[in-house]
Amino acid sequence: MSTAVVIVVIIAIIAIAFALWMYFQKEKTRRLRGKFGSEYDRVVQQERGNARRAEAVLEGRQKRVSKLNLRTLSREECDRFAAEWRRVQEQFVDDPRASVANADALVNQALQARGYPMGDFAQRSADISVEHPQVVENYRMAHDIAERDKRGQATTEELRRAMQHYRNLFEHVLDAHVVQYEEVHR
């Protein structure tokens, strides 16, 4: 075999290896975008546009959450949490601030019952993004409003939106609607 043929074969092998690497990278990006949705874009932005670093962060989240002992709540637990949610929601009319604080605490109780660690908020929201990427932003917005309200900086309208965000997350965590059927038809 001549030197030219060996060089062409080596170049072909390198080109094929590069093409395969590119294909697998695009496939990984497609898979992560499909799983995380807008959370993917948020993490890319957080990583200053570096998609590879963002993907490493998201894969790290998946690995961390796969080691957690997450569980589905029993029907009785779901019913108890849903009843408590309705009580917290009814409280909003008389005391919006207390209602939002109680909603925040109740969501955290439900997450803890599911097996999520109750460390700092940033880690908890990152963990939630793995199973509930479509509502993790609701959690962040509601929590931000609750934190601003603790400093007296949230309006009643913002508190109402926080309750909506918490309810959306709460329903995903419980995997059940928390509004009773008869309430919808009033």
Image (spheres, rainbow, N blue to C red):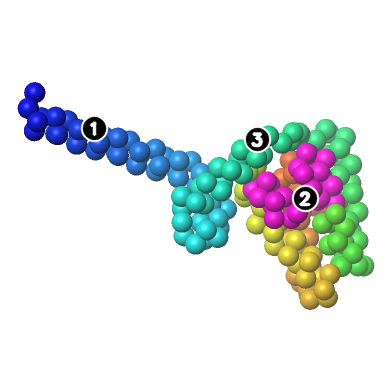
**Residue depth check, mark 1 versus mark 3: number of the one nearer the observer:** 1
Identify the residue position indicated by label 2 in the image: 119
Is 29 on the left or on the right of 127, as rendered? left
Range of residues picked out in magenta: 106-129
Residue at the image position 56 percent from the left and 46 percent from the top: 58
**Which residue type does callout 3 highlight?**
Ser
CB-based contact (under 8 Å), mark 2 and mark 3? no
Mark with earlier residue (2, 3): 3
Taking depth in this image into account, of 85 and 35 the one nearest to the observer is: 35
Is 26 on the left or on the right of 135, as rendered? left
Local SS, label 3: helix
**Which residue type does callout 1 highlight?**
Ile
Classed neighbour count for the residue bearing mark 1: other residues with Cα under 10 Å, few (<14), some (14–19), many (≥20): few
Look at the image and tell me whether residue 81 can be seen: yes
The reply to whether the magenta stretch includes residue 68 is no
Quarter in which the C terminus is drawn: bottom right
Q: Is residue 21 above or below residue 125?
A: above
Classed neighbour count for the residue bearing mark 3: other residues with Cα under 10 Å, few (<14), some (14–19), many (≥20): few
Residue at the image position 81 percent from the left and 43 percent from the top: 112
Identify the residue position indicated by label 3 in the image: 66
Identify the residue position indicated by label 1 in the image: 13
CA gap between label 1 and label 2 equals 48 Å
